[in-house]
Image (tube, rainbow, N blue to C red):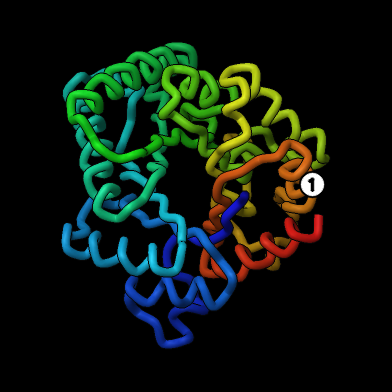
């Protein structure tokens, strides 16, 4: 089963007079959506009380919750002090997730920081092993998955193969496939159904049958020579940076993929989530 939904507030939500996160579950239900991603990208500043309240409200509407961790996580950083901070951001996010009833924590693996891609990836792999040891020390008593995201800029860790190898470290590590990022990194590499199928074939090489259950971000993204530039709207994209959702929808059904598909389109997240859901249903 695939659940569709947005990340954050969209323009339509505000235009309808809504201002609070507590109003989001009913808004999503009214649009037939069943997923939502809460953003801690600029800091983990939600109170425990609000986490509990939101968790209850989303659960009542059967909305699947995920969380996006802080942008300043960087497991490629050569400074051990900064790695300890990144580990702390993950663990503190997981504590909030337990209160929210969320299952998946999305995060950006790291930036190259003048290292070679091979050196940076090796650091990420080593530090993710350390992260899982620290997580085990916490004895969390709820089911969770941490989800490194495929990235769109050439100066970032997170190609499909790199993320797949990260996920091979532990069954609790599940990929976030951001197809806009993948397309941007590859300079428009996602066009045909086979292009999208190759992504899942790569996952299967590293994590076997676990490739069926993934987290997905899907947004049109403008790209340049160094990869991602900015997110753009599907209906306001005259240069057609892509990618298009239709070929992916067919592959999702052929490959029996389950999980969530989250729209991060600027301002139109709900609208594009509904559009993708309809395309998928008709694929």
Residue 240 horizontal side relative to residue 144, left or right = right
- Which of the image's four quarters has the C terminus? bottom right
Residue 58 horizontal side relative to residue 94, left or right = right
Q: Residue furthest bottom?
A: 17
Q: Secondary structure at mark 1?
A: helix
Count the labels in the image: 1
Q: Is residue 31 above or below residue 47?
A: below
Q: Position of residue 58 (x, y in %)?
A: 38, 65
- Looking at the image, which residue is at 50% across and 59% down? 35
Q: Position of residue 51 (x, y in %)?
A: 24, 60
Q: Nearer the viewer, residue 240 or 114?
A: 240
Residue 107 horizontal side relative to residue 55, left or right = right
Q: Which residue is mark 1?
A: 250
- Looking at the image, which residue is at 41% across and 50% down? 66
Q: Quadrant of residue 52?
A: bottom left
Q: Position of residue 148 (x, y in %)?
A: 45, 33
Q: Is residue 82 above or below residue 120?
A: below
Residue 83 visible in the displayed image: no
* Neighbour tally class for label 1: few under 14, some 14-19, many 20 plus, Cα within 10 Å: some
- Looking at the image, which residue is at 57% across and 28% down? 210
- Looking at the image, which residue is at 32% across and 73% down? 22
Q: Quadrant of residue 278?
A: bottom right
Residue 274 visible in the displayed image: yes
Residue 85 horizontal side relative to residue 33, left or right = left
Q: Nearer the viewer, residue 103 or 114?
A: 103
Q: Position of residue 125 (x, y in %)?
A: 40, 16
């Amino acid at each position: 089963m695939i659940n569709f939904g947005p990340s954050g507030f969209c323009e339509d939500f505000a235009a309808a007079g809504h201002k609070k996160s507590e109003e989001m579950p009913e808004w999503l239900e009214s649009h037939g959506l069943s997923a939502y991603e809460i953003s801690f990208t600029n800091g983990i500043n939600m109170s425990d009380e609000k986490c509990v309240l939101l968790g209850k409200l989303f659960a009542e509407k059967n909305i699947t919750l995920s969380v996006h961790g802080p942008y300043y996580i960087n497991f490629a950083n050569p400074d051990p002090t900064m790695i300890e901070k990144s580990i702390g951001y993950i663990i503190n996010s997981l504590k909030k997730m337990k209160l929210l009833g969320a299952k998946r924590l999305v995060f950006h693996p790291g930036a190259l920081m003048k290292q070679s891609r091979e050196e940076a990836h090796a650091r990420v792999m080593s530090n993710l092993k350390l992260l899982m040891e620290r997580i085990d020390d916490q004895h969390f008593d709820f089911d969770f998955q941490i989800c490194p995201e495929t990235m769109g800029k050439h100066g970032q860790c997170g190609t499909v193969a790199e993320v797949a190898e990260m996920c091979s470290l532990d069954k609790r590590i599940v990929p976030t496939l951001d197809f806009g990022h993948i397309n941007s990194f590859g300079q428009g590499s996602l066009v045909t159904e086979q292009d999208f199928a190759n992504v899942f074939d790569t996952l299967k090489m590293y994590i076997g049958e676990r490739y069926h259950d993934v987290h997905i971000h899907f947004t049109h993204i403008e790209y340049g020579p160094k990869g991602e530039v900015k997110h753009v709207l599907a209906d306001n994209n005259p240069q057609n940076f892509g990618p298009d959702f239709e070929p992916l929808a067919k592959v999702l059904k052929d490959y029996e993929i389950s999980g969530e598909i989250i729209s991060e389109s600027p301002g139109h997240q709900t609208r594009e989530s509904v559009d993708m859901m309809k395309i998928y249903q008709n694929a």
